[in-house]
Amino acid sequence: MATRLTHLARASEQTRERRKPLRRRTDQAHPAAQERRKAPRITERVQVAIRGTAAELRTETVNLSTTGAYCTLDQAMTPMTKLQLQFQLPNGARRVQCEGVVVRVEPVIVNAERGRYHVAIFFTDISERDRASIARFVQQRLSTQ
C-alpha cells in the first residue's frame, strides 16, 4: 500500500509540473531578436538609378551594405523582380553597377492620395571590386559614428 501511495504522489507531482505555465526566460535574448545580417549596414542616402521595370526609376537608399540596399519608391514592385542598379558612392570612390532582386516590399502611407513603398534589394551580381568599394565606404562611415 505504501508503494502505491508513493506512486500516486509521484504521478500527482508530475501532473502539477505539466500544468505549470511556461515562463519566458528574460536573461536571454530571443533568437529572432538577434541580428541576422551577415554584412554591416549603414543609414545613408545614396542616389540610385534602377532599371528592370517599364521605366528607369530614380530614388535614394535608406540604408546600404555590401549585400543589398533598402530604398523608398513611389511605386510598388513585386518581390523577386530582377533589377539593374547604378549608384555613385558619396565618398567619390567609384560608380557601382550591379544586379539585384527585390526581396521585400512594405507599403508606407504618406497621405490619403499618395503611398510609397520601402523596398529591400539583395545584390545578386556585383563585381568584387564594387563590393570592396561598398565595404570600404561602410567601414569608413561606421568608424565615424
Image: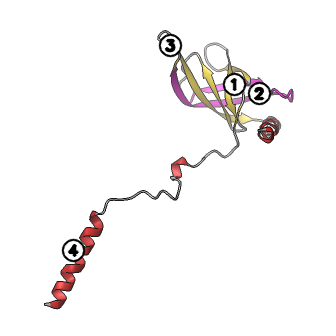
Distance from the alpha carbon under mark 4 to that under mark 1:
66 Å
- What kind of residue is marked 2? Gln
- Residue located beneath label 3 in the image: 111
Query: Which residue ends up furthest to the left in the rendered image?
Result: 1
Q: Secondary structure at mark 3?
A: loop
Mark 4 = which residue? 12
Residue nearer the viewer, 14 or 88: 14
As drawn, which residue projects farthest toward the top? 113
Which of discs 4 and 1 lies nearer the camera? The answer is 4
Residue 99: image location, x then y, percent: 69, 30
- CA–CA distance between discs 3 and 1? 30 Å
Residue 27 at what x, y percent from top left? 51, 59
Q: Please, what is the dominant secondary structure of the magenta stretch?
A: strand
Disc 2, disc 3: CB below 8 Å? no
Q: Secondary structure at mark 2?
A: strand
Magenta range? 80-108
Cα–Cα gap, marks 2 and 4: 68 Å
Q: Relative to residue 3, is residue 134 depicted above or below?
A: above
- Mark 1 sits on what residue? 84
- Which residue matches tag 2? 97
Label disc, if present, on residue 4 of the rendered structure: none
User: Is label 4 in contact with label 3 (beta carbons under 8 Å)?
Assistant: no
Residue under the point 69% across and 38% down = 41
C-alpha distance separating marks 2 and 3:
33 Å
Question: The disc labelled 3 sits on which kind of residue?
Answer: Asn
